[in-house]
Image (cartoon, rainbow, N blue to C red):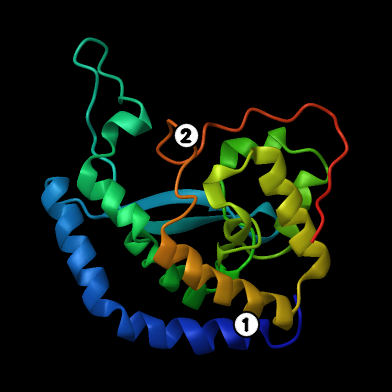
Amino acid sequence: MYPGKRLLDLAVALPLVVLTAPLLALGAALAAGQNGGAWLFRQARPGLGGRLFTLYKLQTMTAARDPATGRLLPDAQRLPPLGRWLRTTSLDELPQLWNIVRGDMSLVGPRPLLPQYLPLYSPRQARRHLVRPGLTGWAQVNGRNAISWEEKFAYDEWYVDHESLALDLRILARTAGRVLGRRGIAAAGEATMPPFRGSAPQKEGIVE
């Protein structure tokens, strides 16, 4: 982590907490109306060094279950139009500003993924935990969820090796265009991405 990164996180995140409060309130009200009062999604995610923290998002998926088995339906079937809209506008990510203020996350870094993926990473993929996870990142501005897992991890690895203030500012600028353009929200046929099940041994890397 370069000197001043934490100051940049706080300098941007704290004002955004205030400025986006009306949007967060709107998103929370919409999510609560969709989910019977539940609006805040909490889930353990690995952060710096692989240590778990609680990630916050607006709850976009319902708790609909298969009447025959009682199991939750697949993610794509539990994502109604309102929840999909919250995702495409990125309003569901606003609670993560508090994760940044708390120091769990940074503005820029590899996106925090599920804990069950930890044993599936190759040594190079696991390097993504050498930095704090981010609200946005190099993989997000180069395809987000429309690229493969291997591409995503290669972009994350490249970021770890090139982390700098100039790169973070570049990513933040490109993120604005991604959010406004609503590009790369999900892989084809998925709510976000298909589950990661490990990568076949191969040469990993990405070019700038």
Q: Residue at x 78, y 26 (%)?
A: 200
For the C terminus, give its image quadrant. Answer: bottom right
Q: Name the N-terminal-most of marks 2 and 1.
A: 1
Q: Which image quadrant is residue 146 in?
A: top right
| Amino acid type assigned to the residue bearing label 1 in the image | Arg
Tag on residue 187? none
Which residue is at the far right?
Answer: 203
Label 2, secondary structure: give it.
loop
Is 188 left, or right, of 137 in this rendering?
left
Is 77 left, or right, of 131 in this rendering?
left
Q: Residue at x 30, y 47 (%)?
A: 84
Between residues 188 and 32, which one lies in front from this camera angle?
Answer: 188
Is 10 left, or right, of 163 in this rendering?
left
| Amino acid type assigned to the residue bearing label 2 in the image | Ala
User: Is 138 above or below relative to 61?
Assistant: below
Question: How far from the left and from the top, in percent, is residue 186?
Answer: 46, 43
Residue beneath label 2, please? 188
Question: How far from the left and from the top, in percent, is residue 187?
Answer: 49, 38
Label 1 neighbour load within 10 Å: few <14, some 14-19, many 20+: some
Label 1, secondary structure: give it.
helix
User: Is 165 above or below relative to 207?
Assistant: below
Question: How far from the left and from the top, in percent, is residue 65?
Answer: 24, 24
Is 141 left, or right, of 156 in this rendering?
left
Between residues 117 and 139, which one lies in front from this camera angle?
Answer: 139
Q: CA distance from mark 2 to mark 1?
A: 36 Å
Between residues 207 and 127, which one lies in front from this camera angle?
Answer: 207
Residue beneath label 1, please? 6
Which residue is at the far front?
Answer: 181
For the N terminus, give its image quadrant. Answer: bottom right
